[in-house]
Amino acid sequence: MYKFTIDQEGKSMSVSTEQKHWIKATIPALEQGGEALTTHFYKLMFSKYPVTATFFNPAHQEKGTQPRALANAVLAYAKHIDNPAVLMGAVTLIVNKHVALGVKAEHYPIVGECLLQAMKEVLGAAATPEIIDAWAAAYGQLADILINAEANLYAKQAMSTGGWEGQRAFTIAAKEQESELVTSFYLKPLDGKQIMTFKPGQYITLHLNVNGATVMRNYSLSDAPNGQHYRISVKREEGGVVSNHLHKQLAVGDTVQLSPPCGEFVLDDSKDPLVLITAGVGLTPAIAMLKAAAGQREVRFIHACKNAAQHSFKNLTEQLSTQHSNITAEYIYENQDGLIKHQTIEKNLPNNAQVYFLGPVGFMSAVKNMLGKLGVPAERQHFEFFGPAQAI
């Protein structure tokens, strides 16, 4: 078993020039067979260390999105091994997800061991001792970076007013049906003490026991910070084990365990015009942003969904747009006007706007393409994925 340790002075492990050469030599193999490697890695890790499976959503394994995301991350790391600092945006994303799920330093040797074993078994003779040693050093370097960053975030959360580390018991104070498929859950701390604030756009992690198995799921916070409760709004997915458990089994008064708010997809602090473009349940973090920005800056809100019956928070958005002259809202139903069009975005795009968009992958890809054609700089485009990152 490969051992990976943190330098006692907090310095990351280094990768030698020769090792970087061997890392780069694996790029063609990773480009061609990266997904096969990571798919085998997950099977190997779940078999040897079943407890690690609780950190992952089985649906993402079945669809292949989780192995694909890891394959892309490994390839990007190999391509930027000379200057991994350019990947800090991805590192921040990983750190937030790991802290939300409770990943700790002791989990990293497990991943390292299984990743290197998977490389040996998938690459075969191409996985020479030099290449395995190089990837061991590269993984150790990355592990040190992540472990230190995650330790800092855990400490920050624990020291925040109303903050905590790990799990904390919350009571379901209320359930409200927002649409045909979406229900909101209002969560208050069981101990009655203060809860830490959060940035609109962040999410919390629910720890649940479903059918005798421990599961964890991230849910965007759908209300602006208020110091009293957290609210999540969950879509009941057909065949979704956890979402159906929440909708059908959990009742007001039941207790759930929560991890503190995490996430880097957050509302910026500027006074620039704000454009929110969402589809389906992708509107949940946008609702928190909309409420926080009300009366503070110009807001254009565009939401697409299948039909009126599946339109969540319509009354709220109409109320906010009536109360605040700086907010305008437009809705597109699939069974009427179809998808969001170029012209719809163009007419709702003030100069120097910050644009946040979220929804199904195909929707986000289309919106990103339209924003590019409309000249919106990449640094003013903000999006995230419900699940593993994908190319759009």
Image (cartoon, rainbow, N blue to C red):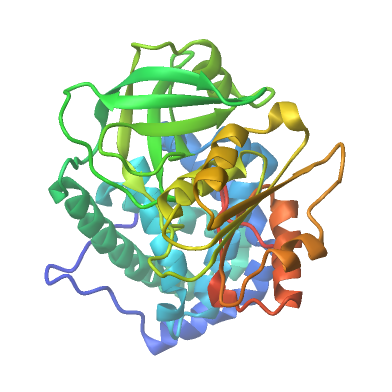
Compared to residue 9, the image places residue 363 above or below, namely above
Q: Position of residue 211 (x, y in %)?
A: 49, 13
The picture quadrant where one finds residue 27 is: bottom right
Q: Nearer the viewer, residue 40 or 247?
A: 247
Can you see residue 8? Answer: yes
The picture quadrant where one finds residue 341 is: bottom right
Q: Nearer the viewer, residue 328 or 268?
A: 328
Q: Position of residue 382 (x, y in %)?
A: 55, 64
Number of marks in the image? 0
Residue at position x 73%, y 76% in the image: 374
Q: Position of residue 199 (x, y in %)?
A: 36, 52
Side of 192 where 255 appears, left or right: right
Compared to residue 122, the image places residue 30 above or below, namely below
Compared to residue 105, the image places residue 355 above or below, namely below
The C terminus lies in which quarter of the figure? bottom right
Q: Position of residue 377 (x, y in %)?
A: 61, 79
